[in-house]
Image (spheres, rainbow, N blue to C red):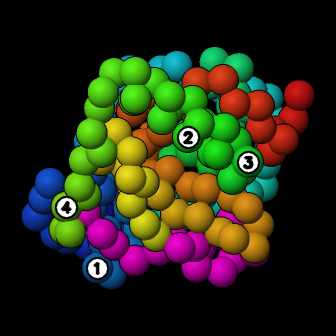
Amino acid sequence: MQCENCGGNLPHASSSKTQRCDLCEAFRCTKVSWKGVSRIKLLAGRTRIPCPACSQELRFGKLKKAKVLHCTACFGLLMTTGAFREMLRKQHTQAAEADQTPQAVEGSSFRPSVPCPQCNTLMDFHPYHGPGDVLIESCGHCNLIWFDQGAAYEHSMASTMELPLANS
């Protein structure tokens, strides 16, 4: 398989949802939840903020009542840590009611962190230890959370947050 960015060879597909080009380090999504992506309403305006995974410009978007920054190329999602905390509170309540047990994240899913789109330092890469197999990046300096290729909406985590990142 060829990299869409530089034409180099991509590694063979694995259980991971992304492939990273060894030459240019661009990402290619291999498994995307189209159902989740279709729930994002794109809003007008330019962000001039690069996607931390693929460098395309993030777009203002809305997912239900939540204002988000969304990448239409790799389907990532950016939000504030405050919004993420509220999301976790709601998710943990729902998980407890459904008696769900957090799933372990496969070691092969780990990859190098991406730069924060606001301050450009490498974000911390770690699993979210709740329902689902979700890996996140976070920047403690800028209080931002990055979900690769729609992990938030794949696992029904982004429901009613209000985020100050997008224009109204």
Spatial distance from mark 2 to mark 3, Cα to Cα?
Answer: 10 Å
Q: Earlier in the sequence, mark 2 or mark 1?
A: 1
Which image quarter is the C terminus in? top right
Quadrant assignment, res 36? top left
Q: How many marks?
A: 4
Residue type for callout 2: Leu
Residue type for callout 1: Asp
Residue beneath the point at 80% across and 44% down: 165
Local crowd at mark 4 within 10 Å, few (<14), some, or many (≥20)?
Answer: few
Q: Secondary structure at mark 2?
A: helix
Q: Earlier in the sequence, mark 4 or mark 1?
A: 1
Tell me if residue 19 comes above or below residue 154 in the rendering: below
Q: Earlier in the sequence, mark 2 or mark 3?
A: 3
Residue type for callout 4: Glu
Q: Which residue is mark 1?
A: 22
In x, y percent, where is residue 55? 57, 62
Q: Residue 165, can we see it?
A: yes
Q: Secondary structure at mark 1?
A: loop
Q: Which residue is mark 3?
A: 82
Q: Earlier in the sequence, mark 1 or mark 3?
A: 1
In x, y percent, where is residue 141? 75, 73
Spatial distance from mark 2 to mark 4, Cα to Cα?
Answer: 21 Å
In x, y percent, where is residue 32? 32, 37
Tag shown at residue 106: 4
39 left or right of 107 in image = right
Residue beneath the point at 77% across and 31% down: 162
Residue beneath the point at 25% across and 63% down: 109
Magenta segment range? Answer: 109-124
